[in-house]
Image (cartoon, rainbow, N blue to C red):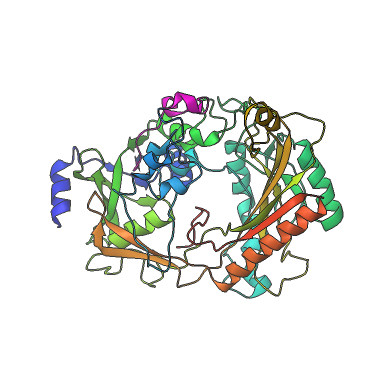
Amino acid sequence: MTRLELQAQLAAPSKRIFDVLVVGSGASGGWASKRLAEAGLKVALVDAGRPQTDDAFTEHMFDFQLRYRNQAPEIIRKTRPIQQLCYACTEYNYDWFSNDLEEPYTTPVDKPFSWLGRMRVTGGRTNVWGRVCLRFSELDFKAASQDGFGEDWPLSYKDLEPYYDLVEEYVGITGIPEGIYELPDGKFHPPMGLTCQEVLLRNRVREKLGWTLTLERSANITKPMNGRAPCHYCGPCERGCVTHSYFNSAFTTVSDALKTGNCTHIPNAMVRQVLMDADRNRAQGLLYIDRISHQPKEVHGRAVVLCAQAQESVRILLNSANSRYPSGLANSSGALGHYLMANVMAGGGSGELSPLNEKPTLNGPHRPVGAYVIRFRNTHNGPRSKRFLRGYGFQVGAGIDFNWTASGFGEAYKKALLEPRVAVNIRGFGECLPRWENYVEINHSLVDSYGIPVLNIHMADGENERALIKDMADSAGEMLAAVGARNIKTFAEPSAPRWAFHEVGI
C-alpha cells in the first residue's frame, strides 16, 4: 500500500461500496450517471469540478459591469496562459477553467499543443461547448473500406441510429433536414432559420458548386422541453444559460441522476488512480485528491467508468500502473495513449457581401449558431481527392453588422460605424488521421499541485492534415468567389498548436 492510499483510507468518511463509480460529469459522464442511476444502481459521480449553479451564469451581463470591462486579458494570462486561448475563456468565466500553473502538462519543444477546455465545474465542457451536433454517417464508420487507411469501426450507422435518436430527443437539437448521405438527418427541433445573407449563400453555393449549406445542427432547443425554456437568442452561450436552453449536463443528465436518489455527487475530486483488488484482478475503487483540502481520499465501488475527457481518462489509467500492470491499466497492447486525434481547424477564408435591405442592431436577436457546409470532398459516390484522405465541413458565419473596422474620429467616425457591413467567415473542421506517433505519456518528472504526475503530449500535423488544410483554404476562396464576395482572404495554417478541442482516439 502506498503512502497516499494509507492516508486516503484513514481519511475515508465511510466504507460504503457503490455499484458504479463514474469519473467525470461532462457529456459522457452525465449520461452514464443518469442511465445507471435510473436503472436502480447506486452511483458515485466523482467530479473534478465544483458544483455549477445558475448564479455563476453571466450571459445577460455587459462588459461595463465587469471589474476590468473584459479588456484585460493579462489578468487571465497570469493563471491561465493556455486556457485563455479558448474563445470561451474570458473575464466572465475564466475561473471555470483549470489553472494552468496548478495543473501543468508538457510537450516536446518542437511539438507545441494547446490543451484547451480543461474545465473545473460540474458539466465539464458542456458549459462552454459550441453545441454543434453532427451525426457520423456510414462513410465515417466504414472509411477504411473507402480509402484503405486504418480500420473500419466495428459497428455501422444502423447500429448506432436508435441511440442517436434517443440522445437527440432528450438533448434537443435544432436543424434543417437535408437528406444528405454524408450527414444523416436527426430528430430536430424546429430550425432557427437562416439569415438573409445565408439564404443567398445557400442558393448560390448549391447552384454554382453543388454543395449544401444548411443551418448548423445545434443543441439549442426551440420549443419548451423537460422544464427547459426555448432559446431566447441572447447570444453568449459560453457564459451559461439561466433558462437551460442549450444542453449542459449539469442541469440535465446530472440533475436527472441526482433526482433518482441513487446518485451521490462527489465534487472537487481530482482522481489520481484506479484502485485494484489484487486477488480478484478487478477495479475496486478510486484514489482521489480533494481539491479544497489537498488530502487524498478513497471511494469504493464494484465497477469504474472513466468519462474524464480523452487525455484525462488515459492519464488516470497510466497513473494506475502497478506490479501486475507496469505500463498502466488496459494497456496490454501498449496502444493506450496512442493515436491521439483532434479536429483540424486551420483552413478557411473571409470576404464581404453587399448589404441587403436591413439594419444591424446591438440588442439582437443573436442566433447562437451559424451555418454549415456539408462535406463535399471524398464523398461516398463523388470524386476522390488525390491529395488527401477523408474530408471536412465548413462552419460559416454571415450576417449584417456594424462597421467595426471603420477608422477616423468624431462625427465622421460615428457615421462610418453605422454603415452596415456583411462579413462572411468560413472555417473548416476536418478529420485527423490516427497515427501511432501522436500520443500521450506520463511525465514522471513533474506533478501538478495535487501531487499527480502530469501528461507529456506528442501531437503534430501529418502530410494528410497539411494537404487537407490547404484544400480548406482553396475551397473557401472558391466558395467566396462563387457567391460574389469582395475582399476575399484565405488562410492555411498548421493546426499545431491550435487543434479544435475535440480530442479522441486514445
- In the image, is 32 to the left or to the right of 288? right
Front-most of 245 and 10?
A: 245
Question: At 75% across and 28% down in the image, what residue appears?
Answer: 359
Q: Let me know if residue 61 is in the magenta part.
A: yes
Residue 389 position within the rendered picture, expressed as x and y whole percent measured from the top left: 65, 70
Residue situated furthest right in the rendering? 207
Magenta span: 46-66
Residue 406 position within the rendered picture, expressed as x and y whole percent measured from the top left: 66, 37
Q: Let me know if residue 480 is in the magenta part.
A: no
Question: At 57% across and 38% down in the image, what residue appears?
Answer: 171
Give residue 328's quadrant in the image. bottom left
Front-most of 159 and 453?
A: 453
- In the image, is 386 to the left or to the right of 232? right
Asked if one can make out residue 272 in the rendered structure from this viewpoint, the answer is yes
Residue 115 position within the rendered picture, expressed as x and y whole percent measured from the top left: 43, 54
Front-most of 228 and 124?
A: 124
Question: At 45% across and 68% down in the image, what residue appears?
Answer: 438
Asked if one can make out residue 142 in the rendered structure from this viewpoint, the answer is no
Q: Quadrant of the N terminus?
A: bottom left
Task: Please count the marks in the image.
Answer: 0
Give residue 144's quadrant in the image. bottom right
Residue 282 position within the rendered picture, expressed as x and y whole percent measured from the top left: 29, 58
